[in-house]
Amino acid sequence: MKKEKTDKLIIVGGPPCQPFSKAGYWVTNEKRNSNEDPRNMIVPYFKIIKELNPDGFVLENVESILHPSNKAAVDTIYEHMQELGYHCSLLKINAAEYGIPQKRKRVFFLASKKEINASLTQTHGSEKNVWQTLICFLMKE
């Protein structure tokens, strides 16, 4: 990377989602400990961020990382961001609301060395639009 001499560096990625996924909720919360799960790569992710020292980064994961049983993982993310001097915006996004033909809920931690207040405008679908389209379609028949 030093050879490239870029003006700005943004890292996009995310640690594996399995420790935080709803698919693992068959394990009771008393036994569930995502911080002890060997697939939890939040700390190694931040080792890379620390080494590369980008201007910003995007950490993506499943929506259920925000579940109370995963609070320690989210706390770890925020602690590392603060320690490394990053500001953060959190976006919760359903891919279907942006033209992706599947319901896939994700969380994006957008981090920057500068102040950040990110938002994203939904481009597709809303409950109202779906019903309006359906009613118009049925009325034409």
Image (cartoon, rainbow, N blue to C red):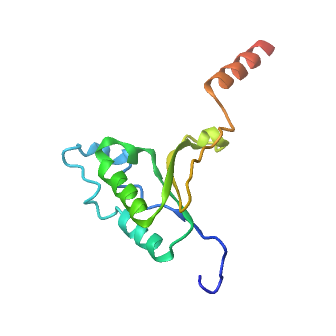
**Residue 46 in the image, given as x and y percentages of width and height:** 42, 67
Residue depicted at x 41% and y 60%: 82
Residue at the far right: name it: 140
Q: Is residue 122 toward the left or the right of residue 85 in the image? A: right
Along the line of sight, which residue is nearer the eye, 120 or 28? Answer: 120
Residue depicted at x 32% and y 48%: 70
Q: Is residue 60 toward the left or the right of residue 64 in the image? A: right
**Residue 26 in the image, given as x and y percentages of width and height:** 28, 43
Q: Which image quarter is the N terminus in?
A: bottom right
Along the line of sight, which residue is nearer the eye, 37 or 68? Answer: 68
Instruction: Inspect this view and state whether residue 13 appears.
Output: yes
Along the line of sight, which residue is nearer the eye, 96 or 87? Answer: 87
Q: Is residue 134 above or below residue 2?
A: above
Residue depicted at x 30% and y 52%: 72
Numbered label tally: 0
**Residue 71 in the image, given as x and y percentages of width and height:** 32, 48
Q: Is residue 122 above or below residue 134?
A: below
Along the line of sight, which residue is nearer the eye, 43 or 98? Answer: 43
Q: Is residue 123 above or below residue 90?
A: above
**Residue 22 in the image, given as x and y percentages of width and height:** 37, 44
Residue at the far bottom: name it: 3
Instruction: Inspect this view and state whether residue 141 appears.
Output: no
Q: Is residue 90 above or below residue 52?
A: above
Residue depicted at x 31% and y 42%: 68
Q: Which image quarter is the C terminus in?
A: top right
